Amino acid sequence: MKKDPEDHRPRLLALELTRRCRFNCQHCRADADRTADAGEMTTEQWKKILDAIAAYEKCVVILTGGEPTERSDIIELAQYARHLGLRAVMATCGYALNDTLLASLKDAGVLALSFSLDGATAETHDAFRRTPGAFDTVVKAAQATRRAGMRFQINTTITRTNLHEVPAIAELARKLGAAVFNPFILVPTGRGEESIRTLTKRSNGMAAATIEPFNRRSPAATRANPIARGKRRDFRIVTILSARGRTGRRSR
Ligand code: SF4
């Protein structure tokens, strides 16, 4: 059925629950650090927002930040979202995840997680995230998520520094068991506003060319790429980078 063009109800909403995060990524839209904003909202305030969202549309809510697991009420908020009929997913950098927390998130109704992976090696990823050990952290988090039986996707912010690694990152995402590989160019906000020119101004065209083979809507390109051929039916590559390399995307 064709969507009514006047229907502006959201399909998904990202809820930035906190600005706290132990990573220090150069492109961070939230300009996150280890301190909470003075005005960080309370559990009850977020519940009121969830009430309002659910009354308007039972959409997907992305629990994000900063790092959403920095909130001690994260399970309570996920449970509340489920209670309202909202579908909760979580964007996390993974450092707090372990088998126990994953089981709690799953029980609370969190349907899937997303991780950022910006390099196929620790050297590239850790440099991008300006956090030693970030690569090992996300790999372990992905492995634990798979063990927990939860779906996850891998997001990759393409820059000049990691452009050549994109096929290897996609392959790593597949090996880790990701359901989706989602490469994109970020919207320059927060810390990214300063770094985006250096990172992507000249690389847009190259990035589009690199990503094009992953575009499963292109039969020729799909034949050219073994991942996109889809040997595993549960592994999907989402290309939101346009051929002109202009499609932006919020990043964390
Ligand atoms: S981009 Fe994400 S992981 Fe990196 S500092 Fe910001 S909130 Fe933390």
Image: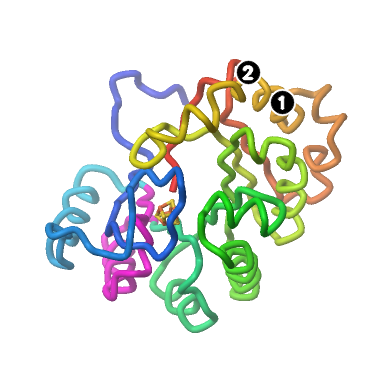
Q: Is residue 194 magenta?
A: no
> In the image, is residue 79 above or below residue 66?
below
Asked which secondary structure carries label 2, the reply is loop
Q: Callout 2 environment at 10 Å: few (<14), some (14 to 19), or many (20+)?
A: some
The percent coordinates of residue 2 (x first, y second) are: 45, 22
Q: Residue at x 37, y 43 (%)?
A: 29
- Residue 119 is tagged as none
Q: Is residue 109 left or right of residue 119?
A: left
For the magenta stretch, what is the residue range?
A: 60-87
Whichever of callouts 1 and 2 sits on the residue coming sooner in the sequence is 1
The amino acid sitting under disc 1 is Glu
Q: Callout 1 environment at 10 Å: few (<14), some (14 to 19), or many (20+)?
A: some
Task: Check disc 1 and report the residue beneath it.
Answer: 212
Q: Residue at x 37, y 55 (%)?
A: 64
- Residue 243 is tagged as 2
The percent coordinates of residue 151 (x first, y second) are: 58, 61
Q: Quadrant of ligand 1?
A: bottom left
Mark 1 in CB contact with mark 2 (< 8 angstroms): yes
> In the image, is residue 147 above or below residue 127?
below
